Image: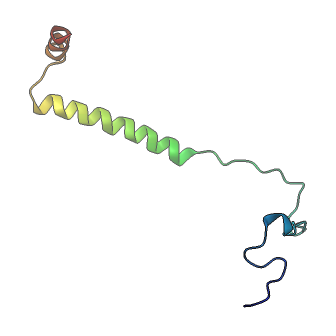
Amino acid sequence: MTNQNENDVGSPVSNTHKNTLIDTTHNTSVTNTLEPPVPNVIMLIVLFILTLVTIYAGYVHGHMKLLTVLKNAAHVV
């Protein structure tokens, strides 16, 4: 059997030392700001446009008219 020090594996968490090291390599006067999510917004717009194009392509491919679709939807309900 081996001797275990106080902070070896298996020791209680309450016996571990807390890290109190202060990071002095970074300038703390600069505030952290988030960058604008421009790429995410652009991709969201592209997603909406592609969704509408897919719906329109379905109407054209099926020779469907909007009024016919709405009448059928009202008839089902």
Residue at figure coordinates x 77%, y 79% from the top left? 8
Name the one closer to the observer, 73 or 41: 73
The percent position of residue 7, horizontal first and vertical second, equals 82, 76
The percent position of residue 71, horizontal first and vertical second, equals 16, 10
Name the one closer to the observer, 3 or 56: 3
Total label count?
0
The percent position of residue 5, horizontal first and vertical second, equals 83, 82
Q: Is residue 60 above or below residue 50?
A: above
Residue at figure coordinates x 24%, y 31% from the top left? 55
The percent position of residue 18, horizontal first and vertical second, equals 87, 66
Q: Is residue 62 above or below residue 2?
A: above
Q: Is residue 14 above or below residue 7?
A: above
Could you say which quadrant of the image residue 11 lies in? bottom right
Q: Is residue 72 left or right of residue 25?
A: left
Q: Is residue 24 left or right of residue 71?
A: right
Q: Is residue 63 left or right of residue 58?
A: left
Could you say which quadrant of the image residue 26 lies in? bottom right
Q: Quadrant of the C terminus?
A: top left
Instruction: State the residue lying farthest toward the left.
Output: 63
Scheme of image coloration? rainbow
Q: Is residue 6 left or right of residue 54?
A: right
Residue at figure coordinates x 84%, y 69% from the top left? 16
